[in-house]
Each structure stands twice: as C-alpha cells, then as structure tokens.
Image (cartoon, grey):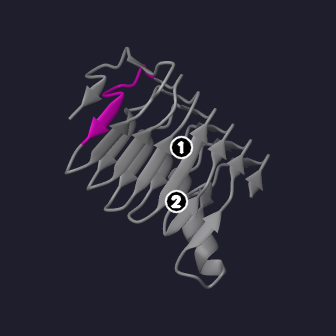
Amino acid sequence: SIKDNIIQGNGKHGISTDIASIMEGKSSCTIDEIVGNKILNNGRKGIYVESSLVKSIAGNVITGNQTGLGVGAGSKALGLEGNTFSKNKNENIVSTGKGALVEIANKNIVNNSKNGVTITNKGTVKITGSDNTFNSNKKNGISLTRKSTLKITTKSGKNQVQKNKNMGIGV
C-alpha cells in the first residue's frame, strides 16, 4: 500500500510501479492500494502503472504533473474512486498499449487538462460507476485513438462529460 503521503517535485514520476517490480526482482508486481495521497507537480506522471496491477486508486489529489495517471501495455489500474485529477499538463488519465486497462469507478473529478482521459494504441478504459465528472478540458473529455476501447456499464446515477473545448467524447 502507498497511503497518506505528499509526493511532489520529482524529476520523473511521483509513483512508479515499474520501479517497484524492478526492486523486487520481478517482471511485474501487484499493489493493493494507492490511497489518500497528494501527488503534485512531478516532471512526468503523477502515478505510472507499468508491468503491474494496482487494485485500488482512491481518494488522491493528482495535480500539476505532465500526466496524472499513466497505464502502460499489459498493466491494470482498477478501482479509481474519489480521486481529483486536475491541471495536469497533458492528460489526466491515459491508457496506452495492448492490454492496458483503467477502470474508473465512482466520484472521480477529471478536469482542466488537455484531455480528461486518453485511450490509445489498443488501450481500454471501463467506466463502471457513476458520479464521475470529465469537465472543462482544453480538448476532449474522453479521447479514443488507434483501435482503443471505451466501455461504459453504469447501472445507476450519471457521469458528466461537459464544457470541454472540442468534444465530450472524441473518436
């Protein structure tokens, strides 16, 4: 678990699961939770999930990084709930590469970036919950490119994709 930290001003990533797997001498690792952190003003990604599974990312404030959350090929970031992604310079959330999966659950705020969510190069994003907000981004609320997948399976409540400069969902 990575819990209740202030992680800021690093030259590359605030949290990198790729480094965790290398330090453990494994090709991949599993992290139960990244919870309650303030991840601010890092040079690249606030959280970088590479060669890993993160079971829960909840209650974090992720702002001022190049990218808020990046998930690479074959990696999974599950259970995003109650996070605030804002003012990250490029994307707030990006899923890129075959097998990359981001699961957005409930009550996430994704705003004030270039794209709220970018899904590219056969990546996948699943929105399984409600009360998520993808607002006021400079380009798109959710952007899909290069054979990517967006799955929305909300049963109740609503998700808001509005006030984005170009499109709510751009394909």
Give the number of the disc on residue 49: 2
141 sits to left or right of 102: left
67 sits to left or right of 16: left
Which structural element holds mark 2?
A: strand
Residue 91 spot, x, y in % from top left: 41, 40
Q: Dot 2: within a 10 Å radius of its alpha carbon, few (fewer than 14), some, or many (20 or more) residues?
A: many
Which residue is drawn at the image coordinates 54% and 50% (left, top)?
78
Which residue is drawn at the image coordinates 37% and 33% (left, top)?
114
Which residue is drawn at the image coordinates 41% and 66% (left, top)?
74
Asked which quadrant contains residue 29, the reply is bottom right
Amino acid on which the number 2 mark rests in the picture: Val
Mark closer to the observer (2, 1): 2
Q: CA distance from mark 2 to mark 1?
A: 15 Å
Write the start and end of the magenta stretch as one range.
134-144
Q: Nearer the viewer, residue 128 or 24?
A: 128
**Residue 90 shows in the view:** no
User: Considering only order in the chain, which callout, 1 or 2, is on the residue closer to the N terminus?
Assistant: 2
Residue 129 spot, x, y in % from top left: 51, 31
Amino acid on which the number 1 mark rests in the picture: Asn
Query: Which quadrant holds the C terminus?
Result: top left
Q: Nearer the viewer, residue 87 or 27?
A: 27
Residue 111 spot, x, y in % from top left: 48, 26
The residue beneath circle 1 is: 65
**Residue 54 shows in the view:** yes
Look at the picture and state if 11 lies above or below 59.
below
Let me know if residue 140 is in the magenta part.
yes
Q: Dot 1: within a 10 Å radius of its alpha carbon, few (fewer than 14), some, or many (20 or more) residues?
A: many
